[in-house]
Image (cartoon, rainbow, N blue to C red):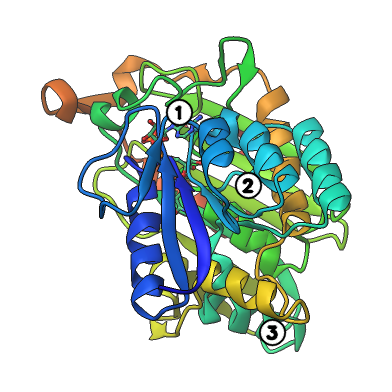
Amino acid sequence: MTGVRVAVLGIHGHGASHVRNVARLAEAGRAELVAVADPQGATDLPARVQVFAGLDDLLAATEVDVVVICTPIQTHVPLATLAMRAGADVLLEKPPTASLAEFEQLSAVVAETGRACQVGFQAQASEATLTLARMIADGELGEIRGISATGKWVRTARYFQRARWSGKRRLDGVDVVDGAVTNPLAHAAAAALLLDGSTGVDDVRSIETELYRANPIESDDTSSVRVTTSRGTKILIAVTLCATEHLEASVIVHGSKRRAVLTYQADLIDGVKYGRADLLENLLAHRADPSVPLYVPLAATGGFTRVVEAVRTAPDPAVIPPELVDWEGEGLDRRPILRDVEKWIDRASDDLALFSELGAPWA
Ligand SMILES: NC(=O)c1ccc[n+]([C@@H]2O[C@H](COP(=O)([O-])OP(=O)(O)OC[C@H]3O[C@@H](n4cnc5c(N)ncnc54)[C@H](O)[C@@H]3O)[C@@H](O)[C@H]2O)c1
């Protein structure tokens, strides 16, 4: 077997999909899964894949070219730092960091080591997202009145109980910032910033946050956030994890000529299907030929990290009055449904307005 030597950290959650992806590239002879690390151990892996409890042990025992990091948010910076200082390139899951200070710290490690750090915002490697960005830049939609990033998602108690860090703002004195805006629906905000050409840390002028929660968690599960970018675009993020039914998230561009809707999970613009590149394949191509740009270098998540920082430093989410919430299901299937939340998200999106400005009953 030849190919780039890849290790995956964190394999029991979303990391399982990274393990499958490396296996796919291994079949094509382009990569080799040499090791994984997870404190929970691993079963069902080919015997040649070495299993470690942590990255320290892994690096001491084996050489790797690329480390895929799919671990809890608060572990991202120490693990990515260790991997890059050991000479590996990194595919780091989103959100890359839990604060702006951590972002600057990690950016310094990228500069110091010269290693590549690709961030797992896979929607940014979607031809749909990139085509819509080009259409906006070319003026096809007219003047851009604003962009809204909306998500009407369902999350049950199972999601919040799967790990200690889930739904936390801080854990053991360390920032986590695992809320609806910054983690599950992070792609929506990041895609909106990309569409505006405002991915850099200096591309954001101001951010207003309104965080709420119906679940018994620390973080927000229903929020509106308005970002004003340096070019003056209003980006309105309106999301919930307490919807009646789970719908695909969408990013809506409000142009003077027309509106366009990006459904990034399915790679659609106004219902028309586009392709998508793979972030790990892109990282391998960049390693082989540095003139191939990364789709999501760490620097291109600076604008998004400003949103993370605003959420991190905002007051704790306000509790939604119980009389506005219906509970459904039992045990791990139990979940709150915030009455009419879909209607208020649509209005926030249309008017580029915060929930409080619209008079949403919980705001
Ligand atoms: N790109 C996407 O669409 C997408 C989707 C889901 C999750 N994610 C991201 O992936 C990351 C992990 O999320 P998740 O939902 O899978 O979390 P999870 O808590 O469900 O799973 C994390 C895994 O990491 C392991 N782990 C914990 N600490 C570790 C360490 N120090 N070293 C190695 N392994 C460690 C855990 O044992 C577990 O197996 C997060 O950053 C999350 O935002 C991205």
Kindly report the distance in space between the C-alpha atoms of the residues bearing marks 3 and 1: 38 Å
Q: Amino acid at mark 3?
A: Arg
Is the shortest distance between ligand 1 and the CB of mark 3 under 8 Å?
no
Give the residue pinned by disc 3: 134
Is the shortest distance between ligand 1 and the CB of mark 1 under 8 Å?
no
In the rendered view, would you say 116 is above or below 316?
Answer: below
User: Which residue: 66% across, 18% down?
Assistant: 315
* Mark 2 crowd level (few <14, some 14–19, many ≥20, 10 Å Cα): many
Q: How many marks?
A: 3
Question: Are the residues flagged by discs 1 and 2 in contact, CB closer than 8 Å?
Answer: no
Question: Are the residues flagged by discs 3 and 1 in contact, CB closer than 8 Å?
Answer: no
Image mark for residue 55: none
List x then y, in percent, for residue 59: 58, 40
Give the residue pinned by disc 2: 353
Give the residue pinned by disc 1: 361
List x then y, in percent, for residue 335: 23, 29
Q: Residue furthest top?
A: 172
Asked whether 308 or 337 is in front, the reply is 308
